[in-house]
């Protein structure tokens, strides 16, 4: 019986977990899939009932939006119509893609988006959701007129929604939730990389990989958020949206250049410099053509996007040529995700030329690329961390005397050199200087190995005596300093008494030793005070050594 109880007490967590799991499954099955009555209010689609007129004036009904209709004349303007009746105000939401907009109800223009809202020197139109308030009318005809920039977007109409302003926002956000979440995730990654770069700045001052990954993440995040159209409901300045959607891509390319330089090997610096110079020239030419209105923005951006893909390929080349990853498995994973991102981006660029790309593909391409970049940043951080750890180990070894295990002469001089009277408040410090007797004679008669063993025994006794109050430094073959902070004369006398007791324990053995010492109390206000204290302690130590010698001669 006791064995069963012990078994239950030992595994009671597992039994409770199994019990709760069975109850949960029972309740889920018994509920028969009953759904909650909660429902998120969304705007309804208004994609049917629209019609247009051809060049001969014949009426054609549109099966459903989105669609593309032909222009009815030599102009680029197209119009679609819809009968509307509503006894209360509603909001109508439609999307324009590089198109000017005129919306009228019963022949009266109630909304207009055109070139006057753009700088006169910039021949470009952005892509926006437009939300128009419809007045309560019993019967009316809505007319939506689009005029595109160039021939590429003639007759293009996206889905249209109708409902309250809040319901329209919910519908838009749910349809673009993937981009919204991806943009927020990239911003969070950028913030994390920024704080990590600041945390590691002291040790990784020369390595900017995390900071450059922060730039790329943040810029990509803002670009994706702009593409999600979430920001247009927060920021109403069209110029800011132009910067986030188009100018931002130039900054992304520049950030990629900085990131590329982090993985550039010395043998490929000339080729990397060529890429840097050519990309900067391409960026300047592209933006000049855009601002001058010589080439439409959506056409010139293809050059920049192709250059960005080339950069990804070149970064992959640098990583493989330079044997960047120590682990072959990690390098294979990096290549796998990088190749996927390059393929996806290339397909998207080709698809944009044919207006047949999907936003989901773009999301996956960005995710694959960032996974690859994070492999690089992680490896760089590991390499730098190991280098710092190795440097700290070498520094630690330089500060330790190998034969005795106490602090070295380098450590003593480092303590003095780093002394800052404003920060290091040292009061009632005691400097004790020890010098072992007859060590040379011992080395000559019994050998240096035996002499080292006696020195180690001496250091062991000295360390045990002053372990709570001081630090022992070996500053010469047989000379040692014990430095105590915030000590009283009673404390030092007590420690010296304990040291003499430990020393006496070796009397009569082959490891017997003796030493002379001198000590002084001081409160350092400058580095010179340490040197002066050491000289005073040295003088007192030699006085003791002379007295010990006289005592042996007359003893």
Image (cartoon, rainbow, N blue to C red):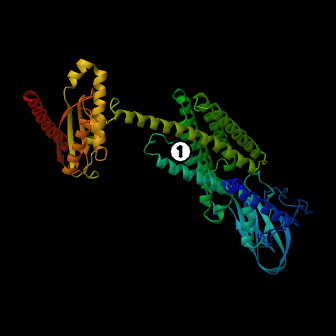
Q: Position of residue 377 (x, y in %)?
A: 56, 41
**Residue 326 visible in the shown view:** yes
Is 294 on the left-hand or right-hand side of 500? right
Q: Nearer the viewer, residue 410 or 130?
A: 410
Q: Residue at x 63, y 60 (%)?
A: 118
Which quadrant of the figure contains the N terminus? bottom right
Callout count: 1
- Dividing the image into 4 quarters, which one contains the C terminus? top left
Picture quadrant where residue 89 is located: bottom right
Q: Is residue 529 left or right of residue 410?
A: left
Bin the neighbour count of mark 1 within 10 Å (Cα to Cα): few under 14, some 14-19, many 20 and up.
many
- Residue 526 appears anywhere in the view: no
Position of residue 393 in the picture relative to residue 51 (left or right): left
Outermost residue to the left: 554
Residue at screen point 72% across, 68% down:
131
Pointer 1 residue: 210
Residue 2's quadrant in the figure? Answer: bottom right
Q: Residue at x 68, y 58 (%)?
A: 180
Q: Is residue 58 left or right of residue 151?
A: right
Q: Residue 243: where, in percent of width, then height?
A: 60, 55
| Callout 1: SS | helix
Image coords of residue 44 (percent x, y):
81, 68
x, y percent for residue 115: 67, 61
Q: Is 198 located above or below residue 315 in the figure?
A: below
């Amino acid at each position: 019986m006791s064995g069963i109880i012990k078994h239950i007490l030992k595994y009671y967590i597992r039994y409770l977990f199994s019990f709760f799991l069975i109850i949960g499954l029972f309740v889920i099955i018994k509920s028969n899939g009953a759904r909650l009555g909660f429902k998120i209010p969304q705007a309804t689609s208004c994609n049917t009932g629209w019609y247009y007129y051809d060049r001969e004036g014949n009426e054609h009904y549109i099966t459903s939006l989105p669609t593309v209709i032909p222009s009815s004349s030599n102009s680029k303007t197209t119009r679609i119509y819809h009968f509307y009746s509503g006894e209360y105000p509603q909001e109508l939401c439609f999307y324009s893609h590089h198109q000017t907009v005129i919306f009228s109800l019963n022949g009266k223009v109630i909304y207009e988006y055109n070139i006057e809202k753009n700088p006169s020197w910039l021949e470009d139109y952005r892509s926006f959701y437009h939300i128009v308030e419809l007045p309560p009318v019993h019967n009316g005809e809505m007319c939506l007129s689009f005029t595109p920039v160039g021939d590429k977007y003639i007759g293009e109409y996206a889905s249209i929604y109708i409902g309250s302003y809040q319901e329209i926002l919910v519908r838009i956000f749910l349809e673009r939730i993937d981009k919204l979440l991806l943009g927020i995730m990239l911003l969070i990654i950028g913030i994390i990389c920024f704080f990590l770069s600041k945390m590691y700045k002291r040790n990784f001052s020369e390595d900017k990989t995390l900071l450059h990954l922060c730039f790329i993440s943040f810029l990509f995040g803002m670009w994706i958020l702009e593409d999600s159209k979430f920001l247009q409901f927060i920021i109403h300045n069209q110029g800011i949206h132009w910067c986030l959607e188009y100018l931002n891509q130039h900054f992304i390319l520049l950030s990629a250049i900085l990131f590329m330089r982090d993985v550039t090997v010395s043998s490929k610096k000339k080729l990397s410099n060529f890429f840097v110079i050519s990309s900067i020239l391409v960026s300047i030419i592209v933006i000049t053509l855009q601002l001058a209105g010589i080439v439409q923005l959506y056409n010139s951006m293809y050059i920049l996007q192709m250059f960005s893909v080339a950069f990804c390929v070149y970064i992959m080349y640098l990583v493989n040529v330079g044997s960047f990853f120590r682990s072959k498995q990690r390098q294979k994973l990096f290549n796998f995700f990088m190749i996927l991102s390059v393929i996806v981006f290339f397909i998207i660029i080709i698809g944009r030329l044919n207006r047949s790309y999907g936003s989901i593909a773009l999301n996956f391409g960005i995710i694959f690329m960032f996974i690859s970049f994070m492999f690089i940043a992680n490896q760089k951080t590991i390499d730098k961390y190991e280098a710092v750890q190795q440097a700290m180990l070498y520094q630690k070894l330089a500060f330790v005397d190998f034969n005795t295990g106490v602090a070295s002469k380098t450590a003593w001089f480092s303590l003095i050199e780093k002394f800052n009277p404003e920060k290091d408040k040292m009061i009632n410090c005691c400097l004790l200087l020890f010098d072992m007797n007859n060590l040379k004679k011992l080395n000559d008669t019994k050998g240096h190995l035996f002499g080292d063993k006696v020195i180690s025994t001496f250091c062991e006794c000295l360390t045990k005596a002053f372990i709570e109050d001081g630090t022992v430094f070996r500053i010469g073959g047989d000379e040692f300093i014990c430095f105590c902070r915030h000590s009283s004369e009673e404390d030092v006398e007590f420690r010296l008494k304990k040291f003499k007791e430990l020393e006496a324990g070796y009397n009569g053995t082959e490891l017997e030793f003796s030493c002379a010492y001198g000590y002084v109390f001081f409160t350092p206000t400058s580095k010179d005070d340490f040197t002066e204290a050491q000289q005073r302690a040295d003088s007192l130590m030699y006085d003791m050594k002379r007295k010990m010698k006289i005592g042996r001669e007359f003893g």
